[in-house]
Image (cartoon, helix red, strand yellow):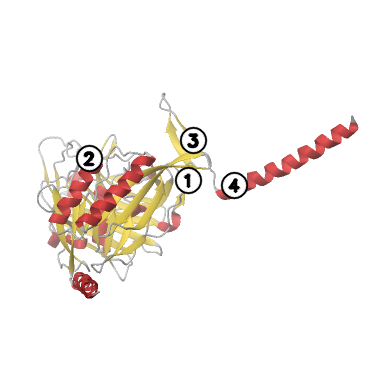
Amino acid sequence: MKCLINLVICSLCINLTLSVKDTYRAAVVVDPPKTVDLGRYVSFIQDAAKSKADILVLPSPEKPNYGEEYYDEAVKTLSEAAKENKIYVVAHLYEETRCHGESEVVRNNLVFDRRGAVIVVYRKPLNKRANCTTSPSEIIEFTTDFGVTFGLMMEEDLVLKKPRSLKNYIVAGEWRSEIPFLSASQFSSSWAYVTNANLVFSGGIYAGKAGLKSGSGKMSVVELHKNCDSGETIAPVVPPTKSYPSEDALHLYAVKAVNVEVSLRGYTETVCHDELCCEFYIKSDFIGSTPSEVSYGLAAFNGARHFGVHYHIGAQSCAVFAYKPGGITGSESNSTNLHFEKITVTGNFSGPNKSQFPIILSSAKNDILSTKFKFETSQMSQKMTIEASDGDILSFGIFGRDFSKDFESENIRQVNSEGLTWDVYEYLYNEDVQEFFDYVWIRLRIMLVIVSIYILEMM
């Protein structure tokens, strides 16, 4: 009995020590393999525990396993590994279920605590055909024994859901966006900067305005302040990538070409779309002697646009962007010889139920120093401004979310072999619809019985 009491007291002391600390250690896997088996997951958990990490976000495989037996085995294996290594583990697993006679693949974010218990599950249907599993409208929260309350999201939630007042977020579940800046790898740095919150996801660890934090080796383990109060400020610059989504809806924007010759002296321009007006100041100080592969445009957009298959989101944009005939470019293979001495973008984004994010894509010739970067709202004019000096920029501006204009559409755009598009409406089936058809079928059966009796009596 005395040993049991001492064990309880020791456990309480450990938990108290963990919660009193101002920091915690988060871990993610750097450059994970495309296919990950359960044995590799276990080794990741062991490595994170050896590095004294409090919480590990496992990578999402590019080719997930949808089997029901695999899901059950994965939950059991990860639970045992989290318990043996005494570490919090976040995993994104796919599960195939049956619902109303339809097959539905469900994406699951699971959080295991140090005892191996699943303390929270965040589920989303992948195809929404049977519509049995709905995602919550608000961000899910969970609290740890080291004194941190996390918001739990999937990658697309960075765009879809309005940020809360939390200071720590976990993101798991890969999402491939076909729109520039709106995939997690491009948008996460801006999201963390604006919310000034710690953002831990399989693509990296962001410490609010302090930006991306990297560790050494194949696993990145970062010490994070619980209140994200490190005091550092780094401009949320995104480097170009080998494959970058092109903007396929430029015709929706109001666009004016940058006058390169005039920009050498510095000039202002205004571009409006609907009720949004964007004011630009452009001054360039260098033009190369060889022709540039890209041109620059000044763009404004205010309205709703598609995001993924099912969603339309309210969006507002004021941006300077490099473009080729195919659309906006952000590829590292595209060179530009225009250097910006100063660039300022201002828009009237004011209004309720809105959020704005700085978007900066650099050609990686040099970084934009934080001392030469500004992103702020004018209290007098209620306008949002982003400004930078001395940068080689591919895209620069403000992306705004107007959550009041969001809507979810079951309309899917498909392309046939001839390149033509048509609309396909998904199969909708929820409990209310099922009850309705059950009711109609019962009444119809009663009517058929009555008619049959009447016909027999007439014979």
Q: Name the residue under label 2.
A: 295
Local crowd size for mark 1, using a 10 Å CA cut-off: few (<14), some (14–19), many (≥20):
few
Crowding around mark 2 (Cα neighbors within 10 Å: few <14, some 14 to 19, many 20+) is many
- What's the CA distance linking mark 4 and mark 3? 22 Å
* Residue carrying label 3: 423
Q: Can residue 189 be seen here?
A: no
Q: Can residue 424 be seen in this view?
A: yes
Which secondary structure, mark 1? loop
* Residue position marked by numbered label 4 in the rendering: 433
Q: In this view, does 157 lie to the left or right of 188?
A: right
Q: Which of 193 and 259 is in front in this view?
A: 193
In the figure, residue 169 lies in which quadrant? Answer: bottom left
Residue 282: percent from the left, percent from the top?
21, 52
Left or right: residue 439 versus residue 191 is: right
Q: Gap in Å between the C-alphas at discs 4 and 1?
A: 18 Å
Q: Give the quarter of the figure containing the C terminus.
A: top right
SS class, disc 3: strand
Q: Mark 4 touching mark 1, by CB under 8 A? A: no
Which quadrant holds residue 419? top left
Image location of residue 127, percent across then percent down: 43, 41
